[in-house]
Structures are given as structure tokens and as C-alpha cells.
Image: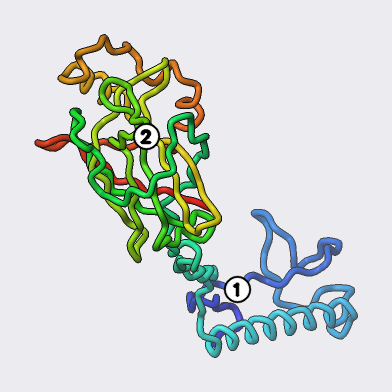
């Protein structure tokens, strides 16, 4: 290969640039201009073996060696393409369901306790239908008794007593026993009463008293209330319409404001009256 050419790493050949040497005073070999003529003879006053000539020969040899090394590198080393490293995406975590998240949430609330009132009678009237001939909007009440403090565990063999006023706001007294009765819960804590929607009296929200005895020595006493929109509709009919009903049967009673969120029965109308299902929690 000619020493006057050089090869780039991509294989393209270009004329080699003359080696650079330190600046010297102009002499006959570097004259330029229109009158310059190439000199083929020896330079006057400078011997061929002088230090300047030796330095020039050394620089030329070094330039040729560098070009040769560059050419050898280009011919033997394959060109490589460097690409930026791409980060490896992290695996998407798969959500897991904890044992707490899959556990069934309790479906009961603790009953708000209330006094038994002046009309409670400790009678042993075990019966499901407690109407005893009293007129009013029929109501079927399905109750389930559970331990609210024990993950809503059903309470079997509990005695559940109900008593309430009739359509005229009157309680049974003396030898009368209407709208009173007791049921024993089955193994699932369930029992059923057939009664009527009670009337109003004494400025109190219409209510049903309930007393639960899970054992002979423990008891919980509370009251059930009714949605006011149902009451205002029911009270326009016989036999309730024999009296002038209050415009707002519930809101005038502070006991209702205390316990309404927990103790209001969800009424469902049906062709023969109303039905409600309620789970009552005790300690």
C-alpha cells in the first residue's frame, strides 16, 4: 500500500496529509512563488547528513508507521454498534386478597337498650299470633337473635317477648292479653310474630317493646320503630283514622332520634299487610 494514502476505519481511502514538522527558516526546498523552481541538487551550505535532515526522515517514518497501524486496526476489528441499555421492566405485582378482606362482615348491630315502660306484664304466653282479634294493619315480624359481640352468632332457645299498643293507642291490662306474646328461638336464632302496626299515644313515636332472655338470668330490653312515611299512610285508613293522626308521628319523640338508625323496622307492603325481617344483636 502507498505511504501517501491512509485508510479510515470504514474502509474509505484518502490522500495522506504530510507530516507536520516544527517551523524552520525558509530554505531552497520551501520556496514558493512564480519564480520557484524545484531543486534537484544538494542544498547549498547544508550537508545531507545534517541534524535537520535526520529529523525530517524520522518524522516521515513515524507518520508511515501510524498510518500502517491504523489500517491494520480497521481491517482486523469489526465495527460494532453501541446501543443504550434498556431497563428491564419490573414485574407487575399480583394483588392478593387478605384473609381479613375475604371474611364475611357482620350483618347485625347491637340493640339500643330502653326501659320496659309501665305496661310490661310478665306473662308466660308462648304464641306466634298475638293479635287476639285486635283490628289494624297486619304485620308479620321475622326476628333473628344473635350475639353481636361474638361475630353475630345465632342465639338458640332465647325467649323473645313482644308487647305494644293497639290501633287506638291502648295496652292490654288486667285480664286482657291482646298484643302480647312470647316465642322461643330455633337453632338459627329465628322466631316469627303475627301482630298489627301499633297506633300512637302520649306524644311518643309508635313502637313495639321487645325483651330478650337468652338465659333465665340475663335479658335485653329495647324498642322497634317504624318508617314515618309508612305510618302517615297507614294512619289514613281504618281503624287508625278514627282519630286524628299526628303530622309527624316520629320526630316529636327524643327516643326515636336516639335509636332510629338502629331500631327502625324496614317495612315491606304485601296484599294482606306488611312484612319485616330484622336481626337484633345482644351482648
Q: Residues within 10 Å of mark 1 (few under 14, many from 20)?
A: some
In the rendered view, would you say 1 is above or below 23?
A: below
Sequence-first tag of 1 and 2: 1
- The residue nearer to you, when weighing 209 against 150, is 209
- The residue tagged 1 is 16
| Secondary structure of the residue carrying numbered label 1 | loop
Mark in the foreground, 1 or 2: 2
What percent of the width, then of the height, locates residue 15? 55, 72
In the rendered view, would you say 89 is above or below 34?
A: below
Q: CA distance from mark 1 to mark 2?
A: 113 Å
Image quarter for residue 173?
top left
In the rendered view, would you say 36 is above or below 17?
A: above
Kindly indicate whether the residue at mark 2 contacts the one at mark 1 (C-beta within 8 angstroms). no
- Identify the residue shown where x is 23% and y is 43%: 194
- The residue tagged 2 is 208
Image quarter for residue 204?
top left
What percent of the width, then of the height, locates residue 125? 33, 48
Q: Residue furthest front?
A: 175
- Identify the residue shown where x is 73% and y is 84%: 61
Q: Is residue 209 left or right of residue 115?
A: left
Q: Is residue 38 left or right of residue 120?
A: right
- Identify the residue shown where x is 37% and y is 18%: 201
Amino acid at each position: 500500500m502507498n505511504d501517501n494514502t491512509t485508510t479510515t476505519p470504514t474502509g474509505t481511502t484518502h490522500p495522506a496529509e504530510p507530516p507536520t514538522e516544527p517551523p524552520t527558516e525558509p530554505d531552497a526546498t520551501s520556496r514558493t512563488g512564480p519564480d520557484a523552481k524545484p531543486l534537484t541538487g544538494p542544498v547549498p551550505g547544508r550537508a545531507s547528513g545534517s541534524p535537520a535532515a535526520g529529523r525530517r526522515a524520522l518524522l516521515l517514518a513515524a507518520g508511515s508507521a501510524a498510518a500502517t497501524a491504523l489500517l491494520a486496526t480497521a481491517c482486523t476489528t469489526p465495527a460494532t454498534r453501541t446501543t443504550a441499555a434498556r431497563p428491564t421492566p419490573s414485574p407487575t405485582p399480583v394483588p392478593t386478597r387478605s384473609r381479613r378482606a375475604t371474611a364475611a362482615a357482620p350483618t347485625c348491630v347491637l340493640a339500643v337498650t330502653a326501659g320496659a315502660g309501665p305496661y310490661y306484664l310478665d306473662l308466660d304466653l308462648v304464641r306466634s299470633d298475638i293479635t287476639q282479634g285486635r283490628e289494624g294493619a297486619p304485620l308479620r315480624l321475622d326476628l333473628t337473635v344473635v350475639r353481636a359481640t361474638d361475630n353475630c352468632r345465632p342465639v338458640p332457645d332465647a325467649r323473645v317477648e313482644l308487647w305494644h299498643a293497639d290501633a287506638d293507642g291502648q295496652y292490654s291490662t288486667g285480664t286482657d292479653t291482646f298484643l302480647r306474646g312470647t316465642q322461643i328461638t330455633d337453632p338459627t336464632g329465628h322466631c316469627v310474630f303475627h301482630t298489627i302496626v301499633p297506633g300512637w299515644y302520649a306524644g311518643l313515636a309508635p313502637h313495639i317493646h321487645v325483651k330478650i332472655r337468652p338465659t333465665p338470668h340475663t335479658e335485653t330490653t329495647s324498642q322497634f320503630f317504624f318508617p314515618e312515611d309508612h305510618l302517615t299512610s297507614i294512619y289514613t285508613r281504618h281503624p287508625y283514622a278514627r282519630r286524628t293522626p299526628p303530622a309527624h308521628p316520629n320526630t316529636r319523640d327524643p327516643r326515636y332520634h336516639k335509636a332510629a338508625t338502629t331500631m327502625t323496622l324496614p317495612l315491606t307492603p304485601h296484599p294482606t299487610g306488611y312484612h319485616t325481617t330484622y336481626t337484633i344483636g345482644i351482648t
